[in-house]
Image (cartoon, grey):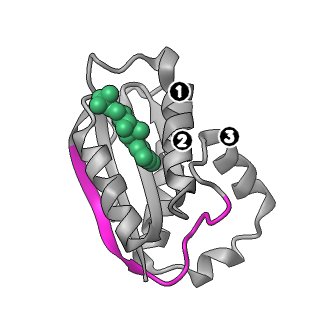
Amino acid sequence: MNLSWCYLSAATPAFDVGRLDELYRSAREFNAARQISGVLLYGHGRFCQMIEGPEAGMREVIARVHDSALHADLLTLHQEPVAVPAFASWSLGTASDWRGQRTSSAGSTLDTLTPAQQAACRVLQHFIDWEDAGATQDFTPIRY
Ligand SMILES: Cc1cc2nc3c(=O)[nH]c(=O)nc-3n(C[C@H](O)[C@H](O)[C@H](O)COP(=O)(O)O)c2cc1C
């Protein structure tokens, strides 16, 4: 059984955007060792992440994410068992991985996902659109 988790959070002053690559690197290393895959988006002081994988490893990662002082105000959008991870090939994909995937896939892969995974994909897309539009208002997830 895989666990899927998607949340939003706000960066704290302890987070330095110049160290975002370092965050991706250490998270990927930890995730890859546990067959965990997912996407992490950052923009304008906000994070949006979906991660998925075998339950035991996921419990460890969820605890690490909750414990990090780099963000606060975590809002879980879903946490549920899934059969098929949405982004199995990414230990932690970025916004540019996401953009590439959206233009290369015909959308049929969405059919194999649960309603919560599909909703999370819409939120991730909405997050990117919000950032592209200059983030003039605070981010609020679309109907989930
Ligand atoms: C937005 C965000 C996403 C994270 N995602 C992951 C992750 O996917 N896998 C992981 O092992 N750790 C993840 N972490 C935790 C970091 O790898 C690291 O353990 C943590 O940022 C250390 O934080 P601290 O220095 O504030 O204690 C994440 C942290 C943040 C802030």
Q: Does residue 43 sit above or below 124 in this rendering?
A: above
Amino acid at the residue labelled 3? Ser
Mark 1 element type: helix
**Mark 3 CB within 8 Å of ligand 1:** no
Amino acid at the residue labelled 2? Asp
Query: In the image, which residues are magenta?
Result: 74-89
Quick one: 98 or 69, which is closer to the camera? 69
In the rendered image, residue 127, in percent from the top left (x then y), is placed at 47, 44
The disc at residue 96 is 3
- Foreground mark, 2 or 1, reads 1
Residue drawn at x 70%, y 56% is: 102
Quarter of the image that includes the N terminus = bottom left
* Number of numbered callouts drawn: 3
Quick one: 121 or 20, which is closer to the camera? 20
Residue drawn at x 46%, y 30% is: 43
- Foreground mark, 1 or 3, reads 1
Check disc 1 and report the residue beneath it. 22
Q: Residue 81: in sight, yes or no? A: yes
Q: Residues within 10 Å of mark 1 (few under 14, many from 20)?
A: few
Q: Residues within 10 Å of mark 3 (few under 14, many from 20)?
A: few
Q: Are marks 1 and 3 in contact (CB under 8 Å)?
A: no
Amino acid at the residue labelled 1? Glu
Label 2 and label 1: CA atoms lie apart by 25 Å
